[in-house]
Image (spheres, rainbow, N blue to C red):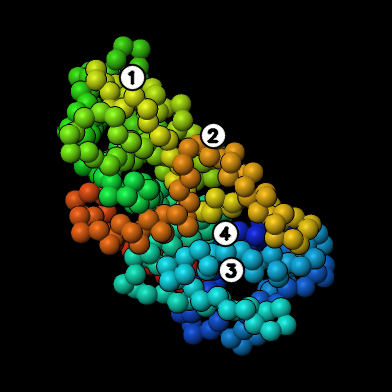
Amino acid sequence: MIKAPGKNGTRSEIADWLEIRALLKLESSSSIVMSVASTESEDHGLDETESGNETELEITEKEVENGLDIVAYELGFRNDSLNEMYPFKYTALPSGHFSLTLDFDETNQAHQMYVFMLLVSGVRDKRIALPDLEAFILQAGTLFHVCASIGVAGLMHSGQTFWFGFPRPDGTNFLDALRKLSDKLKFPKPKQQIPAGMSAQAKDEEIDIVGWRPFVDNRIGGLIVLCQAASGSNWSAKSIISAVPKFSKTFFTQGPYGYGVGAMAMPFMAHHDVELTTKDIEEDFEDACYNRLWSTHSGFGVILDRIRIVQATNEVFSRADHEDAVAGIEKYVDLTSWSKGVLDSLAKVAA
């Protein structure tokens, strides 16, 4: 079941919902056409009425006079930002309508990545309801490390990544992971035991992905990124900023960096929870986005959201060395399998 956003749904939440519907409607050879009105309904939410192959949408929130324009801005932003990397076809139609249809290429890794993160966001927002939802949530949390790794590799340009987050694909414990990371980086010297006063059950110290662009001299002084993969609703409690200096100083006799950069990877849009405003001027929303992203950047480091990870996916898979340089990329096929599983389950529920 797909749950429509309520009256307080943000423009990003509404756009996600429409994209998920487009995924399902394409499978039955139908398209989605939205018509937005400012009339009230009893539940003041988003009401759907289906007629043939068309789905009409009423956004009944009083405060949003031009709801269609607001949603159109969001979909247009996604379409214009990603272009061929966007797995949907967005078309403006006469009389305030627009169409959104699936334009998915099964061989396009950027399309596959977008669909995976869209569905993970739907699960996170409780937009998607399935009998076996908990199993999908557990799998998604681990698989999103692949997205974060690709995002960091794209950020670094020709960079390499290491999967440090627990559970690690190779099943190594914390100290063994430190040694493997040090071997990859060439120069740091990890401590042989957990330092006194630190938890003996250390797992990953909030660090999921480590990324760097190696220099030929293999010495300290380069750029290193420590990234937290946050796919759940509690992402705002996962800042990695405090962990950056502590990690190098605490667990190495010769640390991997004097100055490291924190990053936050997320499957949703960075402005996902920026609310609709009563004003219909796009510049107002852009100001709100700037303020929110400035705050997020200050508190969580480099922002790797859905748009930026999709961009990174396109860049990473064009690299000849991506299989060796990008940690977890061998699990990329599992992302597409997960997405198919969610869509198949949704189809069964709707049947």
Q: Please tell me which of labels 3 and 1 falls first in the chain.
A: 3
10 Å neighbourhood of mark 2: few (<14), some, or many (≥20)? some
- Which of the two discs, 4 and 3, sits closer to the camera? 3
Q: Secondary structure at mark 3?
A: helix
Query: Residue 175 vs residue 106: left or right?
Result: left
Q: Which mark is residue 299?
A: 2
Position of residue 42 relative to residue 94, above or below, is: above
Residue furthest top in the image: 196
Task: Name the residue beneath numbered marker 3.
Answer: 76
Does the residue at mark 2 contact the one at mark 4 (Cβ under 8 Å)? no
Q: Whole-Å distance between the Cαs marked 2 and 4?
A: 27 Å
Does the residue at mark 2 contact the one at mark 1 (Cβ under 8 Å)? no
Q: Secondary structure at mark 2?
A: helix
Q: Amino acid at mark 4?
A: Arg
Q: Secondary structure at mark 4?
A: loop
- Which of the two discs, 2 and 4, sits closer to the camera? 2
Residue at screen point 48% across, 60% down:
118
- Percent across and percent down for residue 94 are 69, 84
Instruction: For residue 159, say whether it is visible.
Output: yes
Q: Which mark is residue 127?
A: 4
Q: Whole-Å distance between the Cαs marked 2 and 1?
A: 21 Å
